[in-house]
Amino acid sequence: MSSYSESSIPIMRYPNDIMTEGPNSDNLAAAAIQSHPVDRMQRAAIVSSSSSSSSSPSSSLDIDAIRRLYGSALAMRLTTERQLASNVGGRLPGLDAHPDSNVMLETLTGGDLDIDFGDFLNLKMNRTHDDAGGRTGNPVMAHSLMESKLGL
Amino acid sequence: FNPLTLPLPLPLPLTQYSFQKPNTTVLTMSEFTNTSISDVKKPEQEAPSGFSFDNIHRNAMIEQIAKAAASSGSNNSYLPQATKTGTTIVGITYKDGVVLGADTRATGGTEVADKNCEKIHYLAPNIFCCGAGTAADTEKTTELISSQLDLLRMNTGGSQSRVVTACTMLKRMLYRYQGQVSAALVLGGCDVNGPHVYQIYPHGSTGKLPYTTMGSGSLAAMSVFETGWADDMTEEEAVELVKRAILAGIFNDLGSGSNVDTCVIRTDGTTTLNRGAVQPNDVKPLRDAIKRSDKLNMRSGTTSVLRSSFTPHSVTLADVTVTAMET
């Protein structure tokens, strides 16, 4: 699973964590298991730029229409603003918000006016896995921290 | 500045040019026309917030093992079942409002998980919702929609939510999850347009009706409604009809049981939530009839005290100073 890539030849980038995924997690059979339909829908909602129910930073803007109607300057200004807001610590200076609060991005996209499952389920700060499709190499953050702390 | 308030210019000819700047955070024109600007990370690499599917493969393996064990051995229900409210929920409109009714049994497979669960959920001061299906799904869905209604009231300055707003929010959410969120709901409330009752199915279809029933006991309850409902009933008649319908579900359906809960929402704005309006399955008389050995009733002093000691714990109270708030 961790070695999944878009090419048909499987490439291992990082070894799988046998403790969390089992000994047979890096073979082709494991990679061929279909994901859950809701999982696919949630991931697709991040990519799609035109769906009204998606939550990506640019989805509430039709950037192409703005470019055609108002010019490239406005389109670039708005997009740069959103990119800066999505960066780490993206907020105007002087705003005393928590670094992970995403205040500026939520204000720009209108996310502060709405609440959905993604606002309280599976938040980044509550995850046990540092979950990435192509594993960054930190399989289970909290557990590995405790292991190193206890010297195991 | 809000781009929507700018005056619309004449359509410009499409020109493509790129900025040559040393600062790499400035984007070139080609990036606007070709790609959709989204998160820097690829979607496959970033798990979204929301439902987590980390354990999906582990669960598939456990199911395989359980199936193998079930076919070879006699160990049934190896897997824990999600708690469902195989249930009877009803809603009717009467002359001055809406009456919602529900039973109080939650089942996990063939076992009763909760003998007195609450199936009538709060959405707004004038809107309540009964939920059937997976208990967690109905609970969290109604809580979420209640928060969304609250946010909408705050953002639009409205004083009262409409029932059709709640219905639309619920059906949009349930359709988006394609029936995976197993919540069948009876939504009822009163707003400026009068009393309304809606039925909402797990895949997102809705119906607006003067009376409706949902759940595994819905047919038993509907038989009571079809013979008993009339236009312009009084509140007493309506509550009596709802109680009879839920009792029909409790006695004729295995998935429903225990008590009857009712909720009356009136057009004048008052609501009455009656938990345990009828309790035909009360076990207290049975419990009281059990004769227990007198050895279990011991007077105080039966056990002799050998030694006792008291150590006061040194407690530092918080230093509380009151500062007047400056306006």
Image (tube, coloured by chain):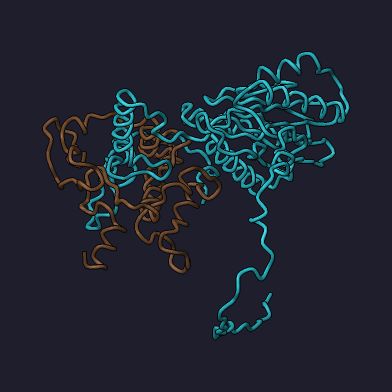
**Residue at 48% across, 30% down:** B176
Relative to B255, B76 lies left or right:
left
**Residue at 79% across, 41% down:** B271
Q: How many marks?
A: 0
The chain drawn in cyan is: B
- Residue B67 vertical position relative to residue B230 in the rendered view, above or below: below
Image coords of residue A84 (percent x, y):
36, 55
- Viewer-proximal residue among B4 and B116: B116
Image coords of residue A113 (percent x, y):
56, 47
The colour chain A appears in is brown
**Residue at 43% across, 43% down:** B50
Image coords of residue B247 (percent x, y):
73, 26
Relative to A131, B5 lies left or right:
right
- Viewer-proximal residue among A144 and A37: A144
Res. B315 in view: no
Report the quarter where the C terminus of chain B lies: bottom right
Image coords of residue B250 (percent x, y):
68, 26
- Viewer-proximal residue among B298 and B282: B298
- Viewer-proximal residue among A76 and B257: B257
Relative to A7, B105 lies left or right:
right
Res. A6 in view: yes
Question: Which of the 4 image quarters holds residue B272?
Answer: top right
**Residue at 47% across, 57% down:** A103
Question: Which of the 4 image quarters holds residue B120?
Answer: top right
Question: Which of the 4 image quarters holds residue B47?
Answer: top left
- Residue B32 vertical position relative to residue B87 in the rendered view, above or below: below
Relative to A15, A117 lies left or right:
right
